[in-house]
Image (cartoon, helix red, strand yellow):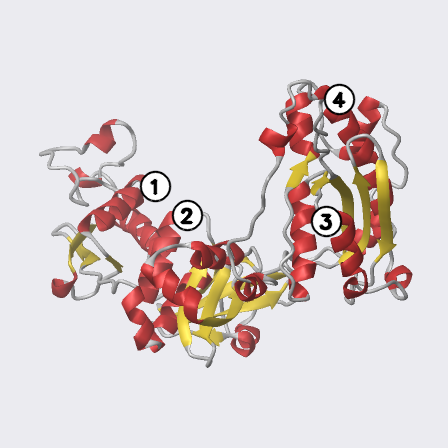
Amino acid sequence: MPIKKVDLYAILDIETTGGKMGEEAITEIAIYRFDGREVTDRFISLINPERKIDDFVVRLTGISNKMVRQAPKFYEVAKRIVEITEGCILVAHNAAFDYRILCLEFRRLGFDYQRSTICTVEMSQRLLPDEPSYSLGKLARSLGIPLSDRHRANGDAMATVHLFKLLLDKDTQKVALSEFVKQNLSTLPIHLLSLLDGLPNQLGVYYLYDKAGKLLLLSKSKNIYKRVNEHFTSEGKRDLFLRKHVGKVMYELTGTLLIASLKEAEELQAQASLSKYKKKKTYPFALVCHKNKTGYLCLSVMLRAGAKQPLAIFESKEEGLNMLFEMTERYELCTKLNGFSQARTYCYNHSIGKCAGACMGDEAVETYNQRVEEALAHYSLVGRTFVLMDKGRTVHEKSVILIEDGSIKGYAFISLNYQLSKPILERHLTPLTHNAEMAHLVEHYLRTHPLAKQIEIKD
């Protein structure tokens, strides 16, 4: 009679230093080799991560830098980890995290570690649908599973062993292997995986260089790690070329998408060979202002070539009219004076209380024109000196963009402790070249972010 093959599992838990994605390191690991009935082997050890443990993680786990100082380094236990998990499916509570960290450590050693995985969070959600929470601690309490040393590798791994046993018993339809096992077979060569290590899942500009140091690509992204990984896995012609030739990846965090866009535009203009990857933008339409016969300021969108003093520029007439309509509505300007109404008497907005009658001369010219100036001050850069302030790269700083007399001067990251002044700004400023594209990026930001923090700045 044939003997039924027994599935082997390596049930594990990992504690790490914390920190940015791709920069973490293991501080403690516990692995229980399990044959579906009982534990047949185990490995438990602190690990010297060779980097500082985040203060928050020290408080959470109780694992301090002093505790791991004399512990073995990962390369000293790597062989044991390979041996105890050989031929096993890795099982963990939130397996994607533990498996990612384990692979990260092996890649640092030049080893491509691959195992299939099962996540007990996903199994619990399927097989225990009525549980109020699927965190390990709350599941353990709800199911009567003993859990000591919470947030320590051994305690959490042992609790996961008990949970996994219970889930296998609950799995009467035997769907664990067919539905919950992830194969996790890497499709990337190890040198590309190593280039991904350390890249942040944050917003900024990234640079891909070939092995000789020549810049192949620069671009912005809201998630640098994800975007570079897409380059490495895409089958597009350009990405296949990048994958073949890339030798180094650099990045710079920007805190905001606007600074990323400005930095990308600035650097692409200086890299003529890369411009072919970005469609050159033109801005043929402009917002203009003139006084009518009775002295009211009237706004309109026209071809930029005929505009003496463009107040804002646009890629299309539709974009310009959309902005003008938004200004008209927000500042209760007259739709007739701004060209949206051809009424012979009062405009429609007057009938619903959104126009004070400038179209028929009822509103004082000075009062109406003041609102037009306020609208232009919010949506246009022309003649203005101010700082556009937003979040920084960390919680301890703010980003600022300096506009002086309508011209973009540059950006800076300022500590929250600094008193904002022009001399401080100029010391920290990274210069930018003002041109039509840069102006459009800032103007577009202002009209799509009406609550953006604009601070008038003086010497």
Q: Across the whole image, how many numbered discs are drawn on residues?
A: 4
**Does the CB distance between marks 3 and 1 fall below 8 Å?**
no
1 and 2 marks in contact (CB < 8 Å): yes
Q: Is residue 393 left or right of residue 52?
A: left
| Circle 1 crowding by C-alpha within 10 Å: few under 14, some 14–19, many from 20 | few
Please state which of the two labelled residues, at mark 2 or mark 3, is closer to the viewer.
3
Q: Nearer the viewer, mark 1 or mark 4?
A: 4
Nearest the eye: 345 or 62: 62
Q: Secondary structure at mark 3?
A: loop
Which tag, 1 or 4, sits closer to the chain's start?
4
Q: Are marks 2 and 3 in contact (CB under 8 Å)?
A: no
- Which mark sits nearer the N-terminus, 4 or 3? 3
> Label 1 to label 2, Cα distance in Å?
10 Å
Q: Secondary structure at mark 1?
A: helix
In the rendered structure, which amino acid carries the disc numbered 1?
Answer: Arg
- How far apart marks 4 and 3 lie (CA) works out to 24 Å
The picture places residue 167, in percent across and down from the top left corner, at 73, 25
Q: Which residue is mark 3?
A: 86
The disc label shown at residue 450, or none: 2
The amino acid sitting under disc 4 is Asp
Q: Are marks 4 and 2 in contact (CB under 8 Å)?
A: no
At 14% from the left edge and 50% from the top edge, which residue is drawn? 294
Q: CA distance from mark 1 to mark 4?
A: 63 Å
> According to the image, label 1 marks what residue?
330
Residue 157: x and y in percent read: 81, 41
